Image (spheres, rainbow, N blue to C red):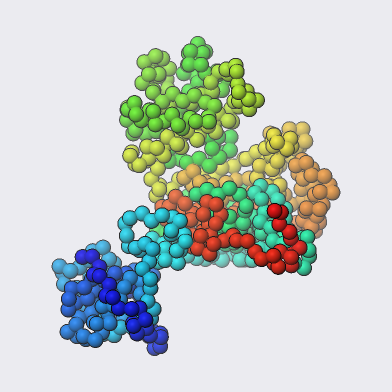
Amino acid sequence: MSESPVLPTPLHAIDLEPLGDWQRTGYAGDLRLAQAGQKVTLLGWVQRRRDLGSLLFIDLRDRAGVCQVVFNRENDEQMHERALHLRSEYVIGVEGEVVKRAPDTVNPNLASGEVEVIARRLAVFNDARTPPFLLDSEVPIAEETRLKYRYIDLRREAMQRNLRLRHNVAAAIRRYFDKHGFLEVETPFMTRSTPEGARDYLVPSRVQPGSFYALPQSPQLFKQILMIGGCDRYFQIVRCFRDEDLRADRQPEFTQIDVEMTFPTMETIFQLIEGMLVEAFAAAGFPLQTPFPRMSWEEAMARYGSDKPDLRLPAMVDVREAFSAADLEQLRLRSDLPLLAIRIPQVGALSRRERDELRPLLEGRPVKLFEDFARIQKNFPEAGAKITALTSCGPEDLIALVGAPLEESGAENAEQAKPLTRLQLLSHGGALRLALGQKFAERHKLLDPQDFRFLWVTSFPMFEWDEEERRWAAAHHPFTSPLDEDLQRLESDPGAVKAKAYDVVLNGTELGSGSIRIHQREVQAKIFQMLGMSEEEATQRFGFFLEALQYGTPPHGGIALGLDRMVMILAGQTTIREVIPFPKTSRAVDLMVDAPTPVSPRQLRDLGIRLKE
C-alpha cells in the first residue's frame, strides 16, 4: 500500500523533543522471533508510513535494517494522533513491546519480518524535508544526485552494507598483521615532492614562502626508512594521493594496505599476503584456495595481452602456425608477428547485427579482427581444423582472430607509419579479448563476479623506454631491486633487465604491487644514473635516503594493496565510488561540499601565491 498523504500541519507545530532519557536497547533490524515479549527502545528514521485508520504502521530504520512499528488508536489516541504527522526521514524514538506477527502478515523480505513492535511511547527528535530520492526505491538514482546528497545516500541499505563490509575487511586485516608480529605505524601526509609516475598534490608552506609539501602518492620511502630504523615488520592502512586522470578504480585520494618487512624472499611475501587475503575474504563470507598461481610478465603478455590478466576467460593462442605463408598473404597479415585466436565460451553463432556491433571495438586499433570463424573454416579448412584443436574450441564457442595487417603505403602521419610491434599487437589482442568477454558476459553468464581468480605476476621489466624523454624510466619505481643475475646487464642491456617486482591480480584488476627493494647505496645510485639523473639531481631529490642506506640497511621488501579495489570486488561493484564514503566525481569534484573552490585573496597573500589571470 502506498504512503498516505501528509497532513497539512506546519512543521513548527510538531512538538520536537530533546533526547533526554531515551536510550536504545538494540537495533530495529536485529529484532527476531526470539525477542517476542520483550520491551525495547528503538531510535532511528521513518522509512515509510501506512495509514489504515485506527492502525498506523511505521517502518523504522536504523543501521541494522528495518522493523515495523504499530500505533493503535485504541491503545493511545493521543500518541496515534502525533504519529499521523510523521513523514519519511523524520528522526524518532519508540518504546514498545516486540510481538509475533500473524502468519498471514509475516514479511519475508525483512530480516525482522516475523515480529513487529507495538508502540507505547513516541518521541520526535527532528523533522525532515522531503528527500531528493526515495531510499528504498528500485528506480536508478543519478550518481550526481547521490553524491550531492551523500548524507542521505549513505542511509540506503546498499551503502550501509558496503560500509560494514569495508569495516569487516579492514578489521580482519589488522588482526592478521598483529597476529604475525607487524606494527601499525603512521607516516606523514606532508612530505617532500619526489615526482615519479603521477603528479603530486602540493601544499604551500606559509612559514617557508615559496616552498611546498607534497601529499604522499604512497609511503614508499618512509616504510623503507622504518626498515632501516629497525621496525622489522610494518603495516598501515593509509590514505594516498595522486593527481592523475580518474576512472572507475581510481580516485584522487584512496586507501592502500601498506606492508614492509626485513629479510624477506618473494616466497615469504607471497605466503604472507595470501594468508592476509584469505582472512580478508573470509570476513566477507568468501573462502579462498591457496597458493595462488604464478606467471611471469612475459607469459602474461603472450597469453593474455595484459600484465593484469582476467583468468575467467580463456587465454589467447598464437595460431600463426595453422596458416601457410600464402594463406597469411591472402589474409593481408604479417607473418613475422603472432596471429592471436580469442575464444569466448558458449556464445553461439553471431547474427549480422551482432557482427556489426563488434566493429566499434576496432576503432583506433592498428590490427585486423576476423570474427567470422565459419568463413575461415570454409576458406581455409586445414587451418580451421588446426585452430579448433589448438584452442580446444567447442561448437558454441566464439573464435575471433587478431593479427597485424600488412603495412600499407600512404600513412597519414609518422605515428601511423611506425610498424606494429609484438608487444603492441599482444596488448591490442588482450584489450579485444576483454571487450568481447564483457560484451557477451551478461547474456552467457561469463565473468561471474564471485569467481575469484587470483594470480601472481612476476619478473617484470626493470625499465621501460620513454620515447618522449628519450631515456629509460622505472617500470615499477626506482627503489626496486633488479634480479641478482641481471646486475651486470644494467648498462650493457637495460631493456633485458628483470626486476624483483610482483603484482597480485584478481579478475583483471591489479589488487596489489610490490617488490624487493634496493638496500645498497651503490646500487641505488647506479639506478638513479640509469634513469638519467645526475649525481647532483639524485642528491637533491633523494639525498636523505642515499645517506640512510649507508648506515647498515637490511635487505627488505613489501607490497601495497588497494583496499578500495578489494572491497569493490567483494561488494560486487564496478566502481570504487560505491565503497568510499565520500568520493569525488570523475572530474575530481566533491559535489556534497563543493570542492575544490577558489580561496580568498588574503589566503593567497599569506602563502605568497599569485594566480595568473
Residue 479's spot in the image, x, y percent? 71, 49
Give the image quarter of residue 414. Answer: top right
Left or right: where 418 falls relative to 339: right
Residue closest to the far right: 536
From this view, report whether residue 405 is shown above or below residue 114: above
Residue at 34% x, 85% y is: 15
Residue 515's spot in the image, x, y percent? 64, 49
Give the image quarter of residue 453. Answer: top left
From this view, report whether residue 531 is shown above or below residue 398: below
Residue 267 visible in the displayed image: no
Residue at 43% x, 58% y is: 145
Count of marks overlaid on the render: 0
Residue closest to the far top: 326
Left or right: where 376 falls relative to 467: left
Foreground: 572 or 121? 121
From this view, report whether residue 121 is shown above or below residue 377: below
Query: For the N terminus, which image quadrant?
Result: bottom left
From this view, report whether residue 45 is shown above or below residue 261: below
Residue 203's spot in the image, x, y percent? 69, 61
Residue at 47% x, 51% y is: 575
Foreground: 224 or 120? 120
Left or right: where 586 falls relative to 485: left
Residue 75's spot in the image, x, y percent? 19, 85
Foreground: 603 or 149? 603
